[in-house]
Image (cartoon, rainbow, N blue to C red):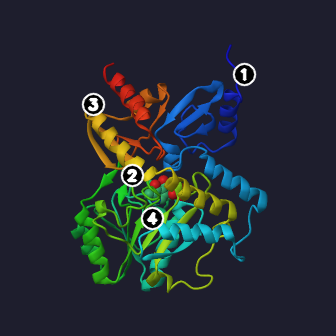
Amino acid sequence: MKPEPAINVNEVISLEERYQLATYKKMPIVPDRGEGVWIYASYGERYLDLYGGHAVAATGHCHPHVVKAIKEQAEKLLFYSNLVYSEARARAAEKLVSLAPDVLTKAFFCNSGTEANENAMRMARMTTGRQNIITFSGGFHGRTADAISATFLGKYRELGKPNVPGHLQAEFGDIDSARALADDSVAAIMLEPIQSMAGVRMAEPSFYRALRELCDERGIILIYDEVQTGIGRTGEWFFAGSKAGDGVVPDIVTLAKALGSGIPVGACLVTEKVAAHIKENDLGTTFGGGMIAMAAVTATLEAIEEDEMLENVRTVEAYLRARLKGVEQVVNVRGRGFVLGLEFADAAKPIHEALLDRRIITGTSSDARVLRLLPPLCLKREEVDLFVDALALIRSQ
Ligand SMILES: Cc1ncc(COP(=O)(O)O)c(C=O)c1O
């Protein structure tokens, strides 16, 4: 006999549809609990989560160390604003800065990726006294006014009309297109170093180096939007400073998603040069740096370290790539670490759906032929086997 469902699935679905704006295309899943790379729905059926709740669940679902830290903080103090000092905030800032490339010495905490990018662009304008921002075709930076105006991907920018003025579009991977726009009106060049939503697009290492040189030459602030690539997803703590990016370190790195293992939190990491231009009351947010979020940040970073997840990402990525060589349908594997785009000859959506029927959650992207994988950083070989075997079965149908 099946156990009683913990929740009434149909009721939950109909209530959400009745009382929420229809802004999301949802999968027909009502997760009840999560553990590691698994999501458990009612009746105990489980899903292999290769999407990580949109790159958020880096430490896996409900990592015990993170849950404990949140619980302990919740019992002490849920929140107090930035007008007081906080041990939780002090520890989180110290830990985050200690893992970042050396020149990124100060943190500003906010609540989301789009907010981190808004603040990064504002800091660049304050530092340079200039207005314009160059971003790239295919980049996604969020949905608030300035961030959506910086997003030259599909319909997003249109949704933000009227856009914030002064946003200029260069071609991703093409340094000449950036150089042509980089005059003395430009405060910042901002990019997703790996363009996730666009279908996991990377540039050559020399592109990142050339951007750094261009910014240095023309007094422009370089911003990496590492909302997806940060906090270990590429098999290194950050894309900034990594070999894939020719060791380039930008002036500002923005973070969110994985940073709090699911507790909303964003951050900007900045150099001393940028920090020197930011004064009291220049930036702010009520909830940024709140104690629960800060406890989650420290515990997230500790869990990744203690469980050696960066090494895991690198070895399991290599294993996954090797296994995918045996799947004829996959014509190319893009990306790095656990931000991967599997390119198919035809549309990826039917494959995404067929995998969902087999209880494997993956992501699509703006590139119709690319299936995205953004799994927790603790994904193991056995789970890769489950995925690749399922993919091979879909192929043979
Ligand atoms: C690269 C990148 N930047 C910014 C954002 C916006 O983050 P948030 O949804 O937390 O505002 C996203 C969200 O998907 C993202 O992928």
Q: CA distance from mark 2 to mark 1?
A: 40 Å
Give the amino acid at mark 4.
Ser
Q: Position of residue 82 (x, y in %)?
A: 68, 74
- Mark 4 Cβ inside 8 Å of ligand 1: no
Q: Quadrant of the N terminus?
A: top right
Task: Name which quarter of the figure residue 75 lies in.
Answer: bottom right
* Relative height, residue 133 to residue 378 (above, below): below
* Relative height, residue 273 to residue 363 (above, below): below
Give the amino acid at mark 3.
Gln
Give the amino acid at mark 1.
Glu
Judging depth in this view, the residue of 388 and 29 nearest the camera is 388
Q: Is residue 386 left or right of residue 116?
A: left
- Mark 2 Cβ inside 8 Å of ligand 1: yes
Q: CA distance from mark 3 to mark 4?
A: 36 Å
Judging depth in this view, the residue of 107 and 70 nearest the camera is 70
Q: CA distance from mark 1 to mark 4?
A: 48 Å
Q: Position of residue 172 (x, y in %)?
A: 29, 61
Q: Which residue is mark 3?
A: 329
The reply to whether discs 4 and 2 touch (Cβ–Cβ < 8 Å) is no
Badge 1 or badge 3: first in the primary sequence: 1
**Mark 1 or 3, which is nearer the eye?**
1
Q: CA distance from mark 1 to mark 3?
A: 40 Å
Q: Which residue is mark 1?
A: 4
Q: Which residue is mark 4?
A: 149
